[in-house]
Image (cartoon, grey):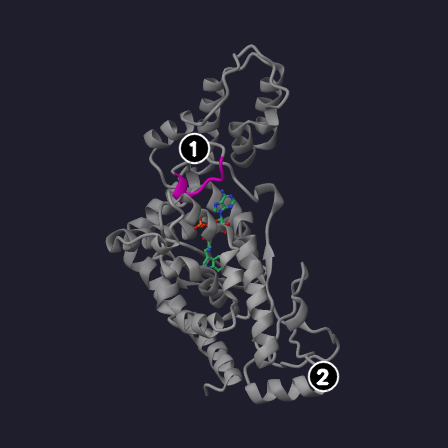
Amino acid sequence: MGSSPLVAANQSNIFAQGVGEQPAEIPAFEDHLFRHFAFCLFGGSLRNLGAMRVLTGIQPSGALHLGNYFGAMLPAIGLQEQGEAYYFIADYHSMTSLTDAAKRRQYTLDVALDWLAAGLNPDRCVFWKQSDTPEHTELAWLLSTVTPMGLLERCHSYKDKVAKLADGDVGAVNHGLFAYPVLMAADILLYDTQVVPVGKDQKQHLEVTRDIAIKFNHIYGDTFVIPEPRIQETVAVVPGTDGQKMSKSYGNTLELSGDEKSLRKRVMSIQMDSRSPADPKPDADKNIAIQLLRLVAPPEVAADWENRLRAGGVGYGDLKKGLFEEYWKHFAAFRERRAELASRPDDVREILRAGAVKARAKAQKTLARAKQACGLD
Ligand code: ADP
Ligand code: TRP
């Protein structure tokens, strides 16, 4: 944190409105008494000039893919240079869908390797795994007591899971899945987060976080910063091989760390329509392979494929081969860095351990503040 916690120049209330797209100011909460005193004096204008605080998490529930990379990881990696960044592996969350302990352990290391190979710099951000900061689960309890059931019942991700059960049997869904957004709110609020880089599928969860924080602040007094999602429209929803959102749970992913043979196979399995190669395709921009090419190929290469497809005369097989080549090239440096890191897993685990110490120091302070606000001190 910066040295002076109080900058009275800007009188707007960060607890009530969040920070929009503007970085650069974060509240300082090191001292409860000071905070309450300042609130009385300045009507919630406690401000601190400092770095924007950014946080995001990814579950270790499977191999990371293009959607994770462009939707969450790259934007987060860009932001680590601009602010105080907290990036974690959401292993508690993964328990709502994965019950194999050995797999969780392996995926946790894999997610760490993917993040680091993608450019996460542990000197520029705090990088750790969630279960090393158990404060998340304690804060989740406090938050759950102010969270209306209806708010959680309306969550798409929960409703989708229930709908997938043949008889819509809510009893077959675990409580963790229902309470998932509350744990996510705790993840975010514990670090006084202002900005959360995520894909579009997480927008509703961010709204729930904001609602919970506002409710808590209303009941117990200003305690939490109200965060904002940061969703990049161009990559808000990366399509999978079947055209649905690419997701670990839909089996439609292109993995970041897949081997050449299986990736080629996945790319060749991308679903296309039945029009013949000669047909012009005026809707070429909707083609899944074109959308993916736009992400991994130089712009002129992607535009060339799109124009040729639009004009007619290009077979889908050739288009997919072209996509595979670009995909493979795009991640060549990533693969090299990842292989190097994978040869020293203990160093990677040490990075996570060191990150957890830093994360915990911050989490403990915020949790103490929240407990004090509730009369639990
Ligand atoms: P998955 O759906 O594969 O399980 P996660 O839920 O772990 O992925 O998502 C981790 C992050 O990656 C989140 O910020 C999420 O919004 C983002 N993300 C996941 N899939 C996509 C996608 N297809 N397009 C854009 N962002 C995505
Ligand atoms: N729910 C997110 C997902 O499935 C993962 C996540 C957990 C997260 N806690 C978070 C993302 C906090 C951002 C901030 O994608």
Q: CA distance from mark 1 to mark 2?
A: 56 Å
Mark 1 or mark 2: whose residue is earlier in sequence = 2
Neighbor class of circle 2 (other Cα within 10 Å; few <14, some 14-19, many 20+) is: some
Asked if residue 191 lies left or right of residue 282, the reply is left
Q: Which mark is residue 42?
A: 2
Q: Is residue 184 above or below residue 172?
A: below
**Which residue is the extreme one toward the top?**
278
Relative depth, front residue between 351 and 268: 268
**Residue drawn at the location 60% of the way across and 47% of the way down:** 232
Bounds of the magenta span? 244-250
Q: Position of residue 187 (x, y in %)?
A: 47, 65
Q: Was residue 248 drawn as part of the magenta stretch in this picture?
A: yes
Name the amino acid, label 2: Phe
Relative depth, front residue between 150 and 261: 150
**Residue drawn at the location 52% of the way across and 72% of the way down:** 146
Q: Secondary structure at mark 1?
A: helix
User: Which part of the image, by quadrant, shows the N terminus?
Assistant: bottom right
The quadrant where residue 41 appears: bottom right
Q: Disc 1 marks which residue?
A: 328
Q: Was residue 84 drawn as part of the magenta stretch in this picture?
A: no
Neighbor class of circle 1 (other Cα within 10 Å; few <14, some 14-19, many 20+) is: some
Name the amino acid, label 1: Trp
Q: Is residue 175 above or below residue 303?
A: below
Q: Position of residue 60 (x, y in %)?
A: 36, 53
Asked if residue 62 lies left or right of residue 301, the reply is left
Q: Position of residue 223 (x, y in %)?
A: 57, 77
Res 119 visible: no
Q: Is residue 259 above or below residue 306?
A: below
Q: Position of residue 96 (x, y in %)?
A: 36, 56
